[in-house]
Each structure stands twice: as C-alpha cells, then as structure tokens.
Amino acid sequence: MNRKTYWYALYRGDEFVDVGTLRELAVRHHTSVKTLRFKATPTYAARTDYADTVRVYKLGNFLGGEEND
C-alpha cells in the first residue's frame, strides 16, 4: 500500500528557509521529526512569538511527483 507523502515549508519569521518532507527537513536541520511536527501545530503558534521562531507549514500531499486529493 502506498503512503501519502506530505511536503512542508520551513520558515524563520517571515524568511523562507527550506521545503521538503519532515524526514528530509529533520536531517538537513539537525532536529527530530517529532519536533518539526509539533512546530506545525496551532499550539506551538499560540505559545511562541512570530518573529525569529521556526514555523512549519504543511503544503500538501504528493505521491510519486503527482498531487493527490
């Protein structure tokens, strides 16, 4: 069975940092998938100031380069 692959965008404040899957971002930015997943939640956004914090935004799901709904 194929699993959906979700893509995420990583921002620091208003500055775009990177894009990729959670695993790719975790490896490139030396953090855990669990941490990045938490930084994509509304709870993290409510607890932190916007400026100079790392934010993760879910872009969509893609499988084999094609968008799936």
Image (tube, grey):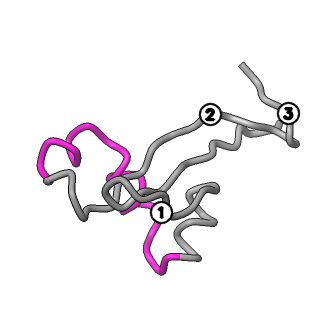
Q: Is residue 33 left or right of residue 5?
A: left
The x and y percentages for residue 45 are 22, 44
| Label 3 element class | strand
Q: Which residue is mark 1?
A: 33
Give whichever of discs 1 and 2 has the lower sequence position.
Answer: 1
Q: Please determine whether, in this image, residue 26 is positioned above or below residue 5.
A: below
Dot 3, how many residues are within 10 Å of its Cα: few (below 14), some (14-19), or many (20+)? few
Residue at 60% of width from left, 56% of height from top? 19
Dot 2, how many residues are within 10 Å of its Cα: few (below 14), some (14-19), or many (20+)? few
Q: Which residue is mark 3?
A: 66
Q: Please determine whether, in this image, residue 34 is positioned above or below residue 1.
A: below
Residue at 42% of width from left, 51% of height from top? 56
Prevailing secondary structure class for the magenta stretch in the rendered image? helix
Kindly report the distance in space between the C-alpha atoms of the residues bearing marks 1 and 2: 17 Å
Q: Quadrant of residue 67?
A: top right
Q: Please determine whether, in this image, residue 13 is positioned above or below residue 45.
A: below
Question: Residue 34 in magenta?
Answer: yes
Question: Residue 51 in magenta?
Answer: no
Residue at 14% of width from left, 53% of height from top? 49
